[in-house]
Image (cartoon, rainbow, N blue to C red):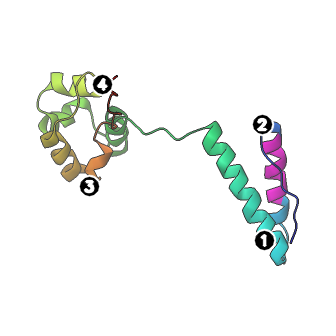
Amino acid sequence: MKATLIVIENDADLAEAQAMVAALMQQTNPDAAALARLRAQAELIAAYERRRWPPRSARPADILRYLMDQHGLERADLVPLLGTPSRVSEVLNGKKQLSMAMIQRLRARFGIPADLLLPPATEPSQAA
């Protein structure tokens, strides 16, 4: 089975590929070739988007702000979890990292996985 696919090298190619996928998805009874073409083109789109806009992991301070917003909390509400008002401020401003005890309390309070609150892993430095 041969099919024409769009190799995506720029945003214009992306728009053309997305239009093709939309047209293939609108077919009422697509045959096996159309489904294979749809899957393949969707994979090419996903690969381009991952390369063009790589995912970024959220910082613990950003996650805390999000949790505060979702639960209607103020900074003062985090004091029992983080220790002191100044520690809350330092954590939210990214000046201090969360301790394991803080992470455990936040995990228990919000029911989230602890690994969301761990700082991103850093690459070990190479000795020259």
In front of the other: label 3 or label 4? 4
Report the side of 97 relative to 127 (left or right): left
Could you tell me the amino acid type at mark 1? Leu
The quarter holding residue 8 reads top right
Does 14 lie within the magenta span? yes
Residue at image coords 21%, 34%? 98
The residues tagged by marks 2 and 4 sit, at their Cα atoms, a distance apart of 36 Å
Secondary structure that dominates the magenta span = helix
Q: CA distance from mark 1 to mark 3?
A: 40 Å
Q: Position of residue 121 (x, y in %)?
A: 33, 38
- Left or right position of 116 against 39: left
Q: Which residues are magenta?
A: 13-22
Instruction: Identify the residue position indicated by label 3 in the image.
Output: 111
Distance from Cα at disc 1 to Cα at disc 4: 47 Å
Q: Amino acid at mark 2?
A: Asn
Using the image as rendered, state which of residue 6 and residue 68 is in the foreground: 6
Q: Residue at x 32, y 46 (%)?
A: 116
Q: Position of residue 80 (x, y in %)?
A: 12, 38
Marker disc for residue 94: 4
User: Dots 3 and 4: beta carbons under 8 Å?
Assistant: no
113 w.r.t. 55: above or below: below
> Who comes first in sequence, dot 2 or dot 1?
2
Which quadrant would the N terminus be assigned to in this image? Answer: bottom right
Name the residue tied to disc 1: 35
10 in magenta: no
Q: Secondary structure at mark 3?
A: loop
Seen in the image, is 39 located left or right of residue 71? Answer: right
**Do labels 1 and 3 touch, CB within 8 Å?**
no
The residue at which mark 2 appears reads as 10
Mark 1 against mark 4, which lies toward the viewer?
A: 1
